Amino acid sequence: MEGLRHRRRSDYVYFLSYRTRWSDNDQYAHINNSVYYHLFDSIINTYLISHCHLSPTEASSIGLVVSSFCHFFAPLSFPTVVELGLRVNKLGTSSVTYEVGVFEENEEIPSAVGGYTHVFVESRSRKSIPMSQTLREGLAKILSGKADARL
């Protein structure tokens, strides 16, 4: 976890903005923990659809979440805009591990860092299968240590 605390914007390649909603706050007046997982889903699936040409309703394979995590460093509250940064930390044959940095607008240090691992399976049988070449190529563009162009 210590390494995650030292992440900066420059550690991420792909970004997506999100304007918080009143309903995102919990009774303690900060963004509820469960909302962070919605944010992770939003940026990851936006990237898969936009840059990997993965159609969730028509694809022959789908990604199932097999593990997830989130480390919180500073609270966020409505109203604010957060900027989500995405990178791939590990790219296997049928699995990928994503990392998402959650930044308050114009901040360099993340308020939270989390993510999850997808295992790609055949959409009907749910049996693990290798990723398509198109999907692998799209994910490789944001692979940590390999990405050199901002998307």
Image: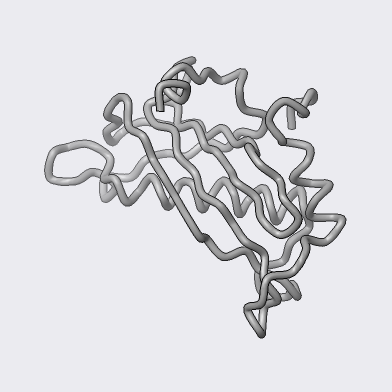
Farthest residue to the right: give it. 133
In the image, is 111 to the left or to the right of 89? left
Q: Give the x, y percent position of residue 101.
A: 49, 31
Tally of numbered discs = 0
Position of the C terminus by quadrant: top right
Coloration mode? one colour
In the image, is 112 to the left or to the right of 119? left
Q: What residue is rendered at 28% in x and 40% in y?
A: 31
In the image, is 97 to the left or to the right of 109? right
Given residues 86 and 46, the one toward you in this image is 86
In the image, is 55 to the left or to the right of 70? right
Q: What residue is rendered at 79% in x and 23% in y?
A: 148
Position of the N terminus by quadrant: top left
Q: What residue is rendered at 76% in x and 55% in y?
A: 93
Q: Where 118 sits versus 20, above or below?
A: below
Farthest residue to the bottom: give it. 125
Q: Where 134 sits versus 101, above or below?
A: below
Kindly indicate the quadrant of the structure image that contains residue 33.
top left
Q: Give the x, y percent position of residue 62.
A: 66, 68
Given residues 5 and 34, the one toward you in this image is 5
Q: Give the x, y percent position of residue 20.
A: 37, 40
Q: What residue is rendered at 22% in x and 36% in y?
A: 30
